[in-house]
Image (cartoon, rainbow, N blue to C red):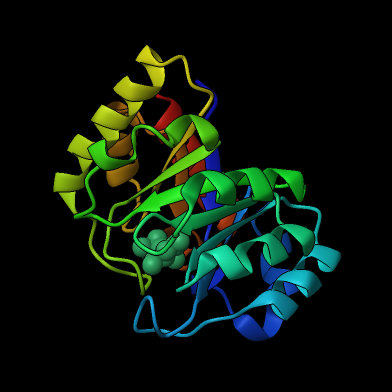
Amino acid sequence: MTVLIAPSILSADFARLADEAAAVRGADWLHVDVMDNHFVPNLTLGLPVVQSLHAATDIPLDCHLMIDDPDRWAVGYAEAGAYNVTVHAEAVRDPVTMAVDLRAAGATAGLSLKPDTELDDWVDVLPSYDTLLVMTVEPGFGGQEFLAHTLDKVRRARRMVQTGHLRVVVQVDGGINADTVVQAAEAGADCFVAGSAVYGSPDRAAAVADLRRRAEA
Ligand code: DX5
Ligand code: ZN
């Protein structure tokens, strides 16, 4: 299985975003957390920053929209140049149309589930998506502790993808570090978002390489 490592710029220095994007050499995607202070109790960045970041870096942008009303806003992120745009299952109104629209706008489509959101309720729409993001913390903040009970959802997601012969990336986000990356990989994840584990390290490229080595082992 190809492993994807996606450093989250939530833990980066927002005054130096282009440099911080360049610092994660060897990473596959740059994870961009968009928060609106409604869907989650935190506020980060929006479309203009994504547009500028897209112009300033070659790394594919993985936009994780923790916002209300993604049906209205998500396509704008695809048009801004995002490689993948992920919306939350708890917020999206028409998940199949959402995925179709994102793909038509040139992005891959991701669906994210909060820790207490059941996977079973989303089985039918999964084939419309390219990425399934299993949140391993409550969305809203970096630097939280990994919730081990979410590993069961990762296992079931991997099984579902395998038995359905789906081409869906199983992504984990939240509390991923040198230990939990191994647990998540064993459970079947193939894409790993890491904020503090990468940007909290003095050598970001080395931190990316270390996570990859552990996930591949
Ligand atoms: C949390 C965000 C995460 C966050 C992860 O709501 O979705 O992407 O940046 O940060 P760490 O890796 O520090 O838990
Ligand atoms: Zn995220």
The front one of 55 and 15 is: 55
Q: Position of residue 177 (x, y in %)?
A: 35, 51
**Is residue 76 shown above or below 166?**
below
Residue 163 appears in the figure: yes
**Is residue 62 shown above or below 19?**
above
**Is residue 38 shown above or below 53?**
below
The front one of 181 and 40 is: 40
In the picture provided, is 54 more to the left or to the right than 72? right
Q: Position of residue 155 (x, y in %)?
A: 25, 29
Q: Position of residue 60 (x, y in %)?
A: 71, 50
Q: Residue at x 48, y 49 (%)?
A: 95
For ligand 1, the image quadrant comes to bottom left
Q: Position of residue 192 (x, y in %)?
A: 45, 44
The front one of 100 and 142 is: 100
Q: Residue at x 41, y 52 (%)?
A: 112
Q: Residue at x 38, y 32 (%)?
A: 124
The front one of 213 and 73 is: 73
In the picture provided, is 26 more to the left or to the right than 180? right
Q: Quadrant of residue 92?
A: bottom left
Which quadrant is the C terminus positioned in?
Answer: top left
In the picture provided, is 72 more to the left or to the right than 197? right
Q: Quadrant of residue 56?
A: bottom right
Return the residue found at the far left: 149
Please count the marks in the image: 0
Residue 26 appears in the figure: no
In the picture provided, is 120 more to the left or to the right than 10? left
